[in-house]
Amino acid sequence: MIKKILFSFFRQFLFWIVFFNFTRLVFVVYHLRLILVEKIPLSEILLIPLNAFHLDLATACYMMLIPFLILLVQSVYSPKWINWINKVYTAILCFAYALTAAGEMGIYSEWKTKLTYKVIKYLSHPSEIYNSSETGIFYLLLLLFLFMFLSGYIAYLKFFAVEIIREKRNIWFSIIFFLVTPPLMFIGLRGGVQQIPINQSESFFSKYNIVNVTAVNNFFNLYISIFENLPNFNHDPYVFMNQAKAKNLIREIYTVKKDTTISILKTPKPNIVILIMESWSADLMEDLGGEPGITPEFKKLERNGILFDQIYAPGSRSEQGMACIFSGFPAHPVSSITVQPDKYVKLPSLPKTLQKDGYSTSFYFGGQLIYGNIKSYIYFNEFDKIMEGSDFPSSIPRGKLGIHDEYTLGYQLDELGKQKQPFFSALFTVSTHSPWDQPFKKPLAWGDNEHEYINAAYYTDHCLGEYFEKASQQPWFNNTLFIIVADHSHNSYRNWHPQSKEYHKIPLLFYGNVIRDEFRGKRWNKLGNQQDIAATLLAQLGIDHKKFSWSKDLFNPYTADFAYYSTEDGAGWIRPNAYFSFDAGPNYYHFLEIPPEIKDSILREGKAFLQGVFGEYLGD
């Protein structure tokens, strides 16, 4: 009995891993012509099962929850009919998985993504699915679905199913099986014991989209897509006015009298380095209203750069900040666009735009990019080189969350000398995130509840000082524009209300000898957001930025002064001398500081902006 129970469990587990890869093989064969056209190396195709394994393992753990309960019952009570419950359950899942696999074959040519929550909408109108597809393709996919389902299920019955019949019971085995198996399955379904649970990013490894799409498990991706969009299945919670009116208001906000810019650079095509500072609040900088002494190296950099002193983070999570910086797309409530590949593939890309202008690109992060599905989004941006924690030499010191900032910054600095110029390189720091285990003294004895946070910022600031001291000795330094910006803000020793504008204020500094002398040491007080970096930078380079429709040029004196930030159920809107923050559900205003004569127009603007951003996020 013991042997058969364990044998049945592991064989059924193995079946799902095999079946997942069988459907992938069919997907690859179906799209073989496209693979040949894109000249995808065979080595990339052969690596798919290996890179898919962890996500497949997690999915299989979810799918084995019911069989585990069935086998647990059979360990003490095993009539023959219970075996049929397991077989029927497996047949249903085989049917559903084969259906998703066939569906993805049909949609990839059009959407370039995996199947998403939209399938729920379409299933309510099956005739539209048939009418919108070519008849020949529809029946071919139907045949492939039946082939995958029947082949998989027959293989299960013949090679993987184990009959459990009445035999002598072993109560001790049942107890051990009950106590040991669930924790192991829990570890498997969350992808291990690491801090961040597994997500689609785990399977991304290639610069070819179809390779990554093939590697991501169908069921896992569909579950994430449905979970992220479940609150919005029946309605858009952020519709405050007629859609046409909202679009007109947004158009008015972004309309400029003159498409021009103030040129701040000595050269039209400098190298560009973006340093994305984890959780840096404006309260860390003395010249942005913070207490002195936390970031003295940053203060030194200000003397040779342009400090933007009215910049706000639209989101509160790292993955939201990435979409703002690299795609010029504002964060929004409920979810993050980077979590859903079917949505972010429609966004513009700053790295791709620069690549077309001759730039080589790279991205460095000392932690795990799996957080917030950032890894898959970074791969979408097609950086020439991508390095996360596991890609760095094992000899480099690291803490619980990843490689300490001094080593990541130093590594990037060494690599930049080898990168083809002009280059665009981004680095995301990690040390100003808990658990604050940086290898450095903690000299700041104040800060109360944020004592650890400000000391972590002091450490990263110290690393910045060393970084720029070494960078200034490099031959490419004088032709390089450095952009230092936070991914999002963080609670500070001032303990601002999380809905307040002060809480969301962040630093943005343009720095380098490539900046014209008359602009160095200047403060720029234009209201803006992270998503404005794209248009601002591209305008300086003379590159068209119209596709970055949510981004405005901060150096264009004709662009409007405004900033926006999202909250869990609403948004904040900032204009010169006016601002509000509200939750849409209860229609509650946390802050409402608007002169009476412009109150209605300011409220309409802010709500129209939120409506427009979320509407584009939801859009098919």
Image: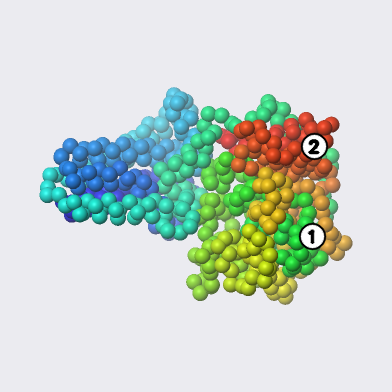
Total tally of numbered discs in the picture: 2
**Which is more toward the observer, 191 or 140?**
191
Residue 108 against residue 424 in the figure, above or below? above
Residue drawn at point x = 70 percent, y = 45 percent? 500
Real-space Cα separation, disc 1 to disc 2, in angstroms: 26 Å
Residue 151 seen in this snapshot: no
Disc number for residue 223:
none
The image quadrant that residue 259 belongs to is top right
Identify the element where label 1 is drawn: helix
Binning the other alpha carbons within 10 Å of mark 1 as few (below 14), some (14 to 19) or many (20 upward) gives some
Tell me residue 521's x, y (percent). Answer: 83, 62
Residue 92 seen in this snapshot: yes
Tell me if 405 is positioned left or right of 168 in this view: right
Identify the element where label 2 is drawn: loop
Binning the other alpha carbons within 10 Å of mark 2 as few (below 14), some (14 to 19) or many (20 upward) gives some
Residue identified by numbered label 1: 287
Tell me residue 540's x, y (percent). Answer: 77, 54
Residue drawn at point x = 15 percent, y = 40 percent? 79
- Amino acid type assigned to the residue bearing label 2 in the image: Ile
Tell me if 331 is positioned left or right of 210 in this view: right
Q: Earlier in the sequence, mark 1 or mark 2?
A: 1
The image quadrant that residue 439 belongs to is bottom right
**Which is more toward the observer, 541 or 442?**
442
Tell me residue 131's x, y (percent). Answer: 46, 25
Tell me if 29 is positioned left or right of 403 in this view: left
Residue drawn at point x = 24 percent, y = 52 percent? 175
- Amino acid type assigned to the residue bearing label 1 in the image: Asp
Residue identified by numbered label 2: 594
Tell me if 441 is positioned left or right of 259 in this view: left
Q: Quadrant of the C terminus?
A: top right
Residue 365 against residue 123 in the figure, above or below? below
